[in-house]
């Protein structure tokens, strides 16, 4: 009994609680320390994240062998999320009006900073070691990419020069055809119409014969020449009413002058008859 009373009761005191840790893949906070990275949930989230990032890395790796150069568009400014570094990086490499597809991502994957961050990510998340090389670009591959990029840029510039030459040739052809059309419109027609040429001399001959016969008629010699009517005097206004009034006034003056002329001729004839034949009116 005394031994039981003297028995020391051992009391277990719990140790200090583990510090909380935030898992960016699972987006949760855990208090179990490093044991969380071995859980099934964490490994499932890790595989899913790596599978989403792997196609972008594979597309960039294909550009090592066949570099693509395109004309710059605003869509080439897009970025992608690097799972190992935990930051956004540009996908394409642009300079001026040209863009090398996946050039910026290849440059990032080949950098020493990305390699260091990848090693830390694999150690912290306990990922499969054989998959780590799929997310890295060796310096040899990056040097091969640079050579391929130079060749692609040269071939692209040659194609652009050919396109520019073709466009210039088309522009010259269109301009030449336009000048020919304008020249054909502005050139005078030197060849006369055969129908108009045959009818014109005869009409002029007929008109000349009529004028000659009318000039030989003695009745035309007694009449004074008719005054020419100036229908388009610059000082008179070109209105319909004014034009009609000027025509009426000129016609009246012509009539009065002709009447006076005929009256003078009749008086002269009467006087001459009285002188030559005085007994005619007795």
Image (tube, rainbow, N blue to C red):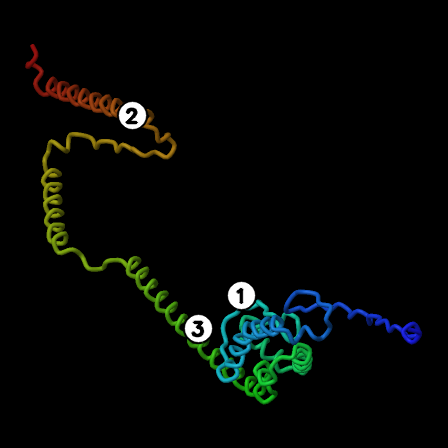
Name the residue rendered at 67%, 78% in the picture: 121
Question: Which residue position holds label 1?
Answer: 75
- Which of pointers 1 and 3 indicates the residue nearer the eye? 1
Reading the chain from its start, which is encountered first: label 2 or label 3? 3
- Does residue 5 appear to the left or right of 249 in the view shown? right
| x and y percentages locating residue 215 in the rendered image | 13, 38
| x and y percentages locating residue 282 in the rendered image | 7, 10
Q: Is residue 4 above or below residue 144?
A: above
Task: From the viewer's side, name the closer residue of 133 and 271.
Answer: 133
- Does residue 267 appear to the left or right of 56 in the view shown? left
Where residue 244 is drawn, which disc sits there?
2
Measure how far apart labels 2 and 1 are at the Cα level: 78 Å
Name the residue rendered at 34%, 28% in the picture: 239
Badge 1 marks a residue whose secondary structure is helix
Q: Residues within 10 Å of mark 2 (few under 14, many from 20)?
A: few
Please tell me in which quadrant of the rendered image residue 33 appears.
bottom right
Where residue 264 is drawn, which disc sits there?
none
Name the residue rendered at 82%, 72% in the picture: 15
- Does residue 62 appear to the left or right of 38 in the view shown? left
Reading the chain from its start, which is encountered first: label 1 or label 3? 1
Badge 2 marks a residue whose secondary structure is helix
| x and y percentages locating residue 81 in the rendered image | 61, 70
């Amino acid at each position: 009994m005394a031994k039981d009373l003297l028995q020391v009761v051992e009391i277990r005191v719990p140790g200090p609680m583990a510090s909380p840790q935030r898992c960016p893949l699972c987006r949760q906070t855990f208090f179990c320390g490093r044991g969380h990275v071995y859980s099934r949930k964490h490994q499932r989230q890790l595989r899913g994240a790596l599978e989403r990032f792997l196609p972008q890395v594979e597309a960039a790796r294909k550009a090592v062998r066949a570099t693509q150069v395109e004309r710059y568009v605003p869509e080439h400014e897009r970025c992608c999320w690097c799972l190992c570094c935990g930051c956004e990086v540009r996908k394409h490499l642009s300079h001026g009006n040209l863009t090398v597809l996946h050039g910026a991502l290849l440059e990032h994957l080949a950098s020493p900073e990305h390699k260091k961050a990848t090693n830390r990510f694999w150690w912290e998340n306990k990922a499969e070691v054989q998959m780590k090389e799929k997310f890295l670009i060796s310096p040899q591959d990056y040097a091969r990419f640079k050579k391929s990029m130079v060749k692609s840029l040269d071939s692209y510039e040659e194609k652009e020069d050919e396109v520019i030459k073709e466009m210039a040739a088309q522009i010259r052809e269109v301009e030449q055809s336009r000048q020919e059309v304008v020249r054909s419109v502005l050139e005078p027609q030197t060849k006369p119409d055969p129908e108009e040429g045959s009818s014109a001399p005869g009409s002029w001959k007929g008109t000349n014969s009529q004028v000659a016969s009318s000039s030989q008629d003695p009745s035309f010699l007694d009449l004074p020449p008719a005054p020419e009517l100036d229908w388009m005097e610059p000082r008179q206004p070109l209105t319909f009413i004014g034009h009609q009034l000027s025509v009426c006034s000129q016609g009246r003056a012509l009539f009065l002058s002709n009447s006076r002329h005929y009256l003078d001729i009749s008086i002269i004839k009467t006087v001459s008859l009285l002188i030559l034949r005085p007994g005619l009116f007795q």
